[in-house]
Image (cartoon, grey):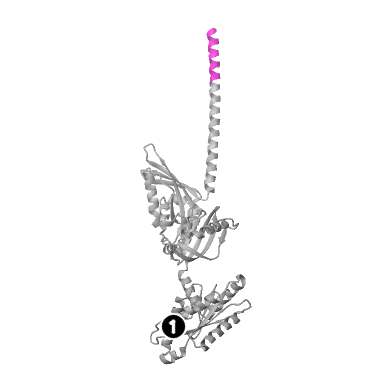
Amino acid sequence: MQDEEKTKQQLIDELKEMRLQVGELKKSEAERRQIEGALRESEERYRKMVNAVTGYTYTVVINEGEAISTQHSMGCYPITGYKPEDYQSDPYLWYSMILPDDRMIAVNAIGNILKGLPIPPVEHRIIRKDGSVLWIRNTLVPYYGEEGHLIKYDGLIENISERKQAEEALRFSEEKFRTIAETAVDAIISANSSGDIIFWNMSAQKIFGYSEDEIIGRSLRMLMPERYREDHQKGIERMKTQAESKYFGRFTEMHGLRKDGSEFPLELSVAMWKVDREIYFSAIIRDITKRKKLERELEKNATTDMLTQAFNRTKFDEIIKREIERVKRYAHPLSMIMFDIDYFKHVNDQHGHTVGDYILKTLTRVVKENLREIDALVRWGGEEFTIIAPETKLELAKILAERIRVAVEHYPFEIVGRITISLGVTQFRKQDTEDTFITRTDDALYTAKRRGRNRTEVSQ
């Protein structure tokens, strides 16, 4: 009886254990189904995400170094014009799509991952189904087996044509700017906000004497004389405060400093621009040495008698107005000397105008040698000359006139030998005008001529 009870209890215990095991099995099955469902959901989300990206993904399975199968997401169609099934019927379709000139890029990339070498994303062109050419970026992710052999690789293809077009446009723009800058006659210099030079064209090298290697990274200040540097810095600071993103300055004349230490006149225009809060400056600099020389020559021609190189009547008008104004403002003395050559008509009649011109030019030189730096010699007309003597009282003016008379009288002129001049001297009076001042000097000259020539007469 006891044995029967014991057997019954064992059966009950075994039944309970079986029920527990069945429960565990049911629980494991439920968990398995839950995991599989989560996996399917995750895979679906991944598939939708992959198909939604602008690029597309693909997988290539490798066996003994050869591609045996490929899988492509739906994103391949917008980029290549081919559908995923097109790749199944032609495993080498992708390679044939690569532009022939770019195929070695892809071949080298695959060769590197077969060797286990890391590779960066590669960029190359493909020919779409419609024949158009597209730039793509191909990112490869390799997977290796236990023995280190490549078993597959995933890839992400992105359309980068717009970026490449932008890069090409930028490259073209930069190349165009550099070509223009390098062939420009004017110096073109760019600097950062600190005033350090970041661009230097060939004309800048020719004008200033510094090579690009010598000047890049150095301060603009070294290109200008010391007297301009403070104003230059103030100008830079003013431009930095401009609210606009660009600033264009007018042409300004100043002086530059060459590598050899010599100064030269230049014309300068400055532009400023801002990029990401950084400020940059560009300057167009023109060497105007020749222009300034020409301007001086033109001014000289406009104010100088061509034969004698004394001032002409135009320059006389400028000087006399300025000096009379100074007399009226500061009460400084001002005198005038007027002279002409005695019997000059006889010289021309006897020896000709060539000798007459020689006399006029030589006489001018002799007179200038006896003038002070502040005095101005003017050819008044024919053989008549005028001297404006600033800061000079009548007594000193007479002494100056006599010195000139004696120097001319003793000069050994060729062919004619001795030449003399007659002179009239006067001092500006408070009530004088320009006309009365000139008339009184002229009267003194004719008094000298009436009284025998080769003499100086003074009009009080």
In the picture, the quarter occupied by the C terminus is: bottom right
Mark 1, residue position? 409
Asked whether residue 6 appears in the rendered view, the answer is yes
Q: Main secondary structure of the magenta part?
A: helix
Image quadrant in which you'd find residue 45 = top right
**Secondary structure under badge 1?**
helix
The N terminus sits in image quarter: top right
Left or right? Give the position of 394 relative to 60.
right
Q: Which of the two residues, 170 or 315, is positioned nearer the viewer here? A: 315
In percent of width and height, residue 79 lies at 49, 54
69 or 7: nearer the viewer: 69
Residue 8: in magenta span: yes
Which is nearer the eye, 379 or 11? 379
Q: What residue is at 62 percent from the left and 73 percent from the top? A: 328
Task: Magenta stretch: give its range.
Answer: 2-17
Give the percent coordinates (x, y) of residue 243: 60, 57
Task: Check the image and report above or below for 237 versus 451.
Answer: above
> Of 357 and 77, which appears nearest the observer?
357
